[in-house]
Image (cartoon, rainbow, N blue to C red):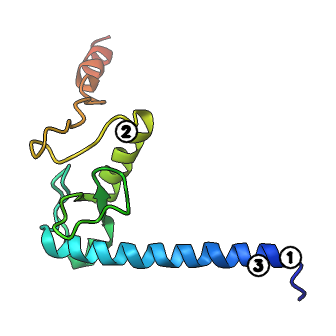
């Protein structure tokens, strides 16, 4: 099968592939460090992890800069996949938010309880 890409496209593909590989290597480095520094517990929901499900525990960069990886881990927190997705969704909604562990340096936790009124609604429906 002939390769119809131009030299420019091949070079660009090579640069992108190299950047992705370097990122993966960098992530492995700080992930391994974070897993040695911190207990295997989600910093938001407190879910505990073991080797069997450790792949579901991620490293979150508090300042959202993946190149800021101090060896003391001060820019990291371990979050489960769900809490990590939630953090980034919150950040996309309001990029002025800089997240952190509750109480550690004054960052705010999400306080909305989406299903808090559900029981009352169900009782009201049942009584009708």
At horizontal 40% and vertical 37% (from top left) the residue drawn is 95
| Residue 10: mark in rendering | 3
Q: Earlier in the sequence, mark 2 or mark 3?
A: 3
Mark 1 residue element: loop
At horizontal 73% and vertical 78% (from top left) the residue drawn is 11
Q: In front: mark 2 or mark 3? A: 3
- Judging by the rendered image, the residue that carries numbered circle 2 is 90
Q: Are marks 3 and 1 in contact (CB under 8 Å)?
A: yes
The residue closer to the viewer here, 76 or 69, is 69
Q: Quadrant of the C terminus?
A: top left
> Cα distance, mark 2 to mark 3?
37 Å
Q: Is residue 67 above or below residue 128?
A: below
The image quarter in which residue 26 lies = bottom left
| Residue 6: mark in rendering | 1
| Residue 92: mark in rendering | none
Pointer 1 local density, CA inside 10 Å: few below 14, some 14–19, many at least 20: few
């Amino acid at each position: 099968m002939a390769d119809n890409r131009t030299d420019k496209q091949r070079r660009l593909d090579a640069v992108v592939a190299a950047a992705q590989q370097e990122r993966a290597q960098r992530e492995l480095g700080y992930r391994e460090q974070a897993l040695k520094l911190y207990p295997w517990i989600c910093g938001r929901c407190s879910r505990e992890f073991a080797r069997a499900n450790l792949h579901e525990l991620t490293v979150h960069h508090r300042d959202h800069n993946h190149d800021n990886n101090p060896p003391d881990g001060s820019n990291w927190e371990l979050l489960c996949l769900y809490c990590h997705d939630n953090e980034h969704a919150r950040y996309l909604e309001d990029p002025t938010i800089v997240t952190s562990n509750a109480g550690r340096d004054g960052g705010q936790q999400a306080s909305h309880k989406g299903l808090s009124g559900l029981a009352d609604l169900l009782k009201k429906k049942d009584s009708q």
